[in-house]
Image (cartoon, rainbow, N blue to C red):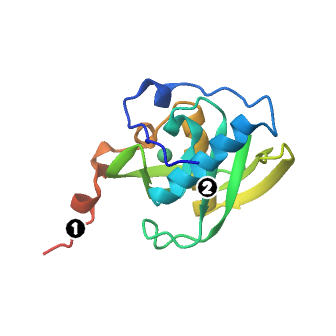
Amino acid sequence: MAVKEVLRMGHPLLKSIAKPVTEFNSSLLDNLITDMLDTMAAFDGAGLAAPQIAVSQRVVIFGIAHNPRYPEAEAIDMTVLINPEILIIGNEIQSSWEGCLSIPNMRGLVPRNTQIKYSGYDQNGDKFEVHATDFHARVVMHEVDHLDGILYPERIENLKDFGFEDQLFQEQV
Ligand code: NI
């Protein structure tokens, strides 16, 4: 299919609640997922939500083998997650740096729960459930936030921990 333009922070679709997918095994859904996979690969992302390519549907994808944007991160199998639901487990919270293809070149320190269970449907409409921790849990929560019109800067506790990547992490001299 195609690499799509990624909407950037400020666009109304990134502030909107996306609609549930109601039909599986449709060419519309299959083409959307192919576009999302192509776009995420082209921009070297760890995840992408359908609203980021201007489609208001509750579809997210994520996965990394080894991503140069997240050198410390564990590998996550490429996953298509549709109509997701998240169950928070426990109350442990950790802060870690996040980026987003809709907010290029910036990073923010975001506190999130470290343990979740998420469920939803795969591309064929089969339901599945996964227990996820740490980076894996963080990626899923970040992507599912997109479906609810939330971008990570809204979750930053101290806006001093938000800025341009090359300025935040420059070598101290
Ligand atoms: Ni994002």
- Residue 62 visible? The answer is yes
Q: Secondary structure at mark 2?
A: strand
Image vertical order of residue 83 relative to residue 70, above or below:
above
CA neighbours of label 2 inside 10 A, class few (<14), some (14 to 19), many (20+): many
Residue at (78% x, 48% y) in the render: 122
CA neighbours of label 1 inside 10 A, class few (<14), some (14 to 19), many (20+): few
Please give the residue where the numbered disc 1 appears in the rendered image: 170
Residue at (59% x, 48% y) in the render: 1
Q: Nearer the viewer, mark 2 or mark 1?
A: 2
Quadrant in the rendering for residue 137: bottom right
Across and down, in percent, residue 138 comes to 57, 54
Q: Secondary structure at mark 1?
A: loop
The three-letter code of the residue at mark 2 reads Phe
The three-letter code of the residue at mark 1 reads Gln
- Residue 85 visible? The answer is no
Across and down, in percent, residue 147 comes to 59, 34
Residue 62 image label: 2
Label 2 or label 1, whichever comes before in sequence order: 2
What whole-number distance in Å separates the C-alpha atoms at marks 2 and 1?
A: 28 Å
Quadrant in the rendering for residue 158: top left
